[in-house]
Each structure stands twice: as structure tokens, then as C-alpha cells.
Image (cartoon, grey):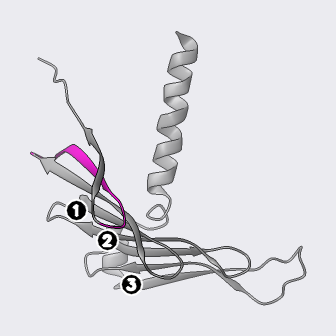
Amino acid sequence: MMMKNTGILFLWILSSVFLAGPIFGQSPKTIKEKKISSLTVQEYFIAEGMDKPVIESIEKYDENGYLLEIKEFNSRAELKLWEKYAYNEEGDVVETQFFNARGKLDSKEVNIYSNGLRIEKQYYNNKDKLVKRKVYEYEYRD
């Protein structure tokens, strides 16, 4: 029983870190207040003798401070991640698009909400064909 709970906790922590990664640095409120439209993070590989910066990531934000797009690069300045996000009026991510290095859509995920809760997640391939669904069911306390 302890092993099962430890595994669930590990998965929860891992997914929380992954989902919070690009948004973890600043809150949408701060981004909005400071009127930030993009953020570029440059990395210096000092131990490797690289004295010029390499772009690690570029993030773009909307006027409400929500992350619209993120691009992450490796130490050779090659694109390793490119995602775009769309939100509903409540600030929930309703669509995430994943692109390859050439800018072609690889896949997308669509979240469907009802009464503020995600009730379904749909996965589409690069031809916009539904390939998988997840349905979320909630239990409520009395």
C-alpha cells in the first residue's frame, strides 16, 4: 500500500513540475502589470568554454499575462520544444499545440470544461484526427 501511494505522489509531483515549468517564473498577474509581451532566457555554458550566450527559451504572453507560446532550445541552439496555448475566459488552457522544428503542427490537445472543471481531454495527430480521449469524473463530498 505504501508503494502505491509513493508512486502516485511521485507522478503528481512530476506532472505538477512539468505543467508549471514554463509558467512557474512569473504569475500572469505580474506579467500583465509589467506589460511584458515576451521573455528570452539566455544561457552561458562557462564550463564548456562558451563565452557567448545561447538562447535557452523564448516565451510570449498575451495582454492578460497568459503564456501564449514557448520555444526551448538545446546548447547548440536547436529547437527542442515548441508549444502554443489558447485559453478560455476563465484562464483555463483549452488547447495546446505542439510543433516540430520546421514549424509544422505535430499534434494538439484540447481540454473541455464544464462548470469550471476539466471533463475531457482530446488528443489529435498532425492531420487533426482524434487519436485518444480522457474523460474526468469527479466525486463530491456530502
On screen, residue 128 above or below 104: above
The spot of residue 44 in percent (x, y) is 76, 80
Q: Is residue 37 magenta?
A: no
- Tell me which label, 3 or 2, sits earlier in the chain: 3
Marks 1/2: CA distance? 8 Å
The residue singled out by tag 2 in the image is 66
What's the residue type where badge 1 is placed? Answer: Gly
What's the residue type where badge 2 is placed? Answer: Tyr
Marks 3/1: CA distance? 17 Å
Please tell me which residue is depicted at 83% across the width and 88% down the height of the picture: 51
Element under disc 1: loop
Marks 1 and 2 in Cβ contact (< 8 Å) = yes
The residue singled out by tag 1 in the image is 91
- Asked which quadrant contains residue 108, the reply is bottom left
- Asked which quadrant contains residue 124, the reply is bottom left
User: How busy is the neighbourhood of tag 3: few (under 14 within 10 Å), some, or many (20 plus)?
Assistant: some
Element under disc 3: loop
Q: Nearer the viewer, mark 3 or mark 1?
A: 1
Q: Is residue 116 magenta?
A: yes
Residue 55, numbered label: none
